[in-house]
Image (cartoon, rainbow, N blue to C red):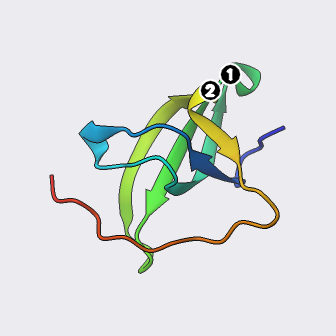
Amino acid sequence: MIRERDRVVLVAAVPAEGLVAGDVGTVVHLYRDGQAYEVEFTTLEGKTAAVVTLEASQVRPVGKREITHARELASR
């Protein structure tokens, strides 16, 4: 079960926000008992890149053997 403050992985791109599948964000709010989440995505410097509401099917929990990967954020 995904909870507030958990890190999650985006499973599909959100082009309007410049996000791609595999981006990692932090859950900042739960909606409808975990049917949707407000997720904050930040740069590696800690600046907010996007805050989006996502359905549960659009994110997954971070795996125990996964590592993060840096990429340049596309300009909007």
Above or below for 7 versus 11:
below
Which residue position holds label 1?
A: 35
How would you rate the neighbour count of disc 2 (Cα within 10 Å): few for under 14, some for 14-19, many for 20 or more? few
Residue type marked 2: Ser
Q: What element carries label 1?
A: loop
Out of 22 and 39, give the one closest to the viewer: 22
Out of 74 and 31, give the one closest to the viewer: 74
In the picture provided, is 27 more to the left or to the right than 50? right
How would you rate the neighbour count of disc 1 (Cα within 10 Å): few for under 14, some for 14-19, many for 20 or more? few
Out of 23 and 41, give the one closest to the viewer: 23
Position of residue 3 measured from the top left corner of the image (x, y, whole percent): 77, 43
Dividing the picture into quadrants, the one containing residue 72 is: bottom left
Q: What element carries label 2?
A: helix
Q: Which residue is most to the front?
A: 65
Whole-angstrom CA distance, mark 1 to mark 2, is 8 Å
Above or below for 21 versus 70:
above
Q: Earlier in the sequence, mark 1 or mark 2?
A: 1
Q: Which residue is most to the left?
A: 76
The residue that appears at 40% across and 70% down in the rendered structure is: 43
Position of residue 31 measured from the top left corner of the image (x, y, whole percent): 64, 25
Dividing the picture into quadrants, the one containing residue 38 is: top right
The residue that appears at 44% across and 74% down in the rendered structure is: 70
Above or below for 9 versus 43:
above
Between circles 1 and 2, the one closer to the viewer is 2
The N terminus: image quadrant: top right
Which residue position holds label 2?
A: 57
Out of 41 and 30, give the one closest to the viewer: 41
Residue type marked 1: Gln
In the picture provided, is 69 more to the left or to the right than 19? right
